[in-house]
Amino acid sequence: MDCRDFQENHFAFVDDTLPGIELVGMQMHLLECEKCARHDASVRRSLMLFRNLAPIEPSADFSSRLQEKLDLVRAADASAAQSGRSRKFAAAVAFTSVVMLSYIGLSLRQVDFPQDIVFPPVVASIPEPATSPVTSPGTAMVASVPAGLPMWTAALFAEQAPVHFASIDLTTAAR
């Protein structure tokens, strides 16, 4: 047994509530360790001192005086708690009122001085047409359309067809 185990089990050892094998281990440790033996002796002497003290006997009217004092303390605590609660409530109401009034005051200042919203001027222009020659419009259209929707391919091709045919005709006519 080491000193830490001895310290953990010392109260049970003093009270004589340990099982037999642990009790023997504690006694053997006392014989081997001087530090734990001094600790055990001081604890046992302290207990002996308190056991030999004369019992304290209260006066005959002790319980009635104690009850009166307890009643006075309870009444004072109740009134303090009640006034404390009312003070806390009043403080909370005052704080909330100040916050709300300041918010309303700031909101009214913004309403009193409205500011005009000015957007930058918009300049409209016609986008330049794409003049890149299309060599194979069907392949380009199919590659840009998601798979599984053959209707979109036809619709996109039909929408772009006049532009492509016109640009092809113009480029071939110019040659």
Image (cartoon, rainbow, N blue to C red):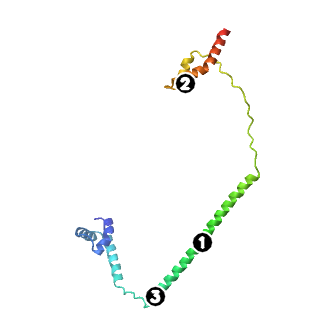
| Tag nearer the camera, 2 or 3 | 2
Q: Could you tell me which secondary element the residue under label 2 belongs to? A: helix
Q: Could you tell me which secondary element the residue under label 1 belongs to? A: helix
Name the amino acid type tagged 3: Ser
Relative to 52, is 133 above or below?
A: above
Whole-angstrom CA distance, mark 2 to mark 3, is: 100 Å
Taking 168 as reference, is 144 left or right?
Answer: left
**Residue 139 placement (x, y as % from top left):** 54, 18
**Residue 72 placement (x, y as % from top left):** 52, 83
Q: Which residue shows up at 28% across the image and 71% down it?
A: 30
Q: Pick the quarter of the image with the N terminus.
A: bottom left
Taking 139 as reference, is 30 left or right?
Answer: left
**Residue 140 placement (x, y as % from top left):** 55, 20
| Tag nearer the camera, 2 or 1 | 2
**Residue 96 placement (x, y as % from top left):** 64, 63
Whole-angstrom CA distance, mark 2 to mark 1, is: 74 Å
Residue marked by disc 3: 64
Name the amino acid type tagged 2: Trp
Q: Which residue shows up at 44% across the image and 87% down it?
A: 63
Residue marked by disc 2: 152
Residue marked by disc 1: 86
Q: Quadrant of residue 120?
A: top right
